[in-house]
Amino acid sequence: MRYEPFVMERWQSTHEHRVGYNLSESGVHPLSVEELLEIAGSDIGSVADVRLGYGQSNGSDQLRERIAALYPGATADNVLVTTGSAEANFTAFWHLLEPSSIVATVLPNYMQVPGLLTNFGSTVLSFHLEEAEGWQPKLNELEDALQKGARFILITNPSNPTGTVLDEARTEGILELADRFGAWIVADEVYQGAEIDGTQTASFWGRSDRVLVTNSLSKAYGLPGLRLGWVLGPETLMEDLWGRKDYTTIAPASLSDSLATLALEAETRSRILARTRGILQENLALLRSWLDTMGSEFTYHPPQAGAICYVRYASDVNSSELAERLRIEKDLLVVPGDHFGMDGYLRLGFGPPAAELEEALARLGEMFSSVA
């Protein structure tokens, strides 16, 4: 079996804990356990008695009920709890994958599933987000991929790396094409809830009988260390999806299940998302103010969701080379556009504490002054 590395994750996991300033992350500054308990109005006793044995392997009943409550018409039987959205995506694509599968994936995108599909020998056909259209997908390219045999569509909404949200016309277009060709949609919705204006992105759930939705507590909730995600699908498929976890992580961590159940209590969830929105609004204002000071160096579409801004820069320097110089010379980590197959771009995470963000941007500005 072939192996091509997941270059962005290799880059981040190798360096993110070895730099002073990290703009490679796409979520807000994470909560501590103490902060989560404070938001929830609980004390340490609520988790101190959690027994560290194997939990229910598809997720506790209460947690699955709280996840299902986020999706109209869903029940706990539609939910499989996973170890992060990475396992949710893996489980979903594994169910849909067949020998010599052809898959349509939106690009640029988080490259986990496209990379896995390539490594497993599938044919990956891309349809692109068009920058001039506010990073909306080219539906004619999707139709072409479906005509060539794609029966599985991967869409990330809100988008990584652009931070944009599908408009309703494109959403309807994707659904119509999937229905016409009998294709499944895997909708990675991990940034749902991290919308800067507070208007939650509409889920693909409930809009087709052939939809699997993946999500997690990592981005919108500031709880990536829980490694807690889920896949939502038709009840008739969940036993099969659950069985595939027997080959991977078997069960979510008991402590993570307990803390996730706490976080998804309705009032607690509302407070967590309000915290996220406050960070995003304050920090995006800082980022946009800084970008304005850089004159014509950068062009970008303001993100609608997530702590990420995908910027095009004018300087004549390769994005991976630039990222490496920033790491070595400025103690600063960013994600180069090369990791999304697009040189001349950077993905800038703006989720750190405001003071750290301002210092990181100052260092980024110094670097562009030296390469210009």
Image (tube, helix red, strand yellow):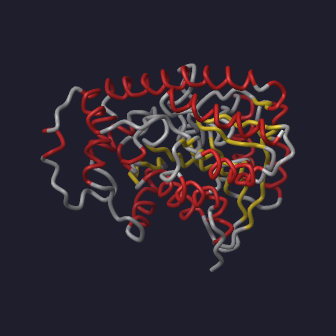
Q: Which residue is depicted at the point 76% across and 30% down?
A: 300
Q: Position of residue 162 (x, y in %)?
A: 69, 37
Q: Is residue 182 visible?
A: no
Q: Is residue 308 left or right of residue 215?
A: right
Q: Which residue is depicted at the point 51% across and 47% down?
A: 214
Q: Position of residue 238 (x, y in %)?
A: 43, 56
Q: Pick the residue in front: 355 or 185.
A: 355
Q: Is residue 105 left or right of residue 44?
A: right
Q: Is residue 318 above or below residue 278?
A: below
- Considering the image in quadrants, where does the N terminus appear? bottom right
- Considering the image in quadrants, where does the C terminus appear? top right
Question: What residue occupies the far bottom of the structure in this picture?
Answer: 1
Q: Is residue 315 above or below residue 3?
A: above
Q: Position of residue 251 (x, y in %)?
A: 32, 60
Q: Is residue 323 visible?
A: yes
Q: Pick the residue in front: 271 or 98.
A: 271
Q: Position of residue 333 (x, y in %)?
A: 60, 47
Q: Which residue is depicted at the point 78% across and 35% down?
A: 369
Residue 94: image quadrant is bottom right
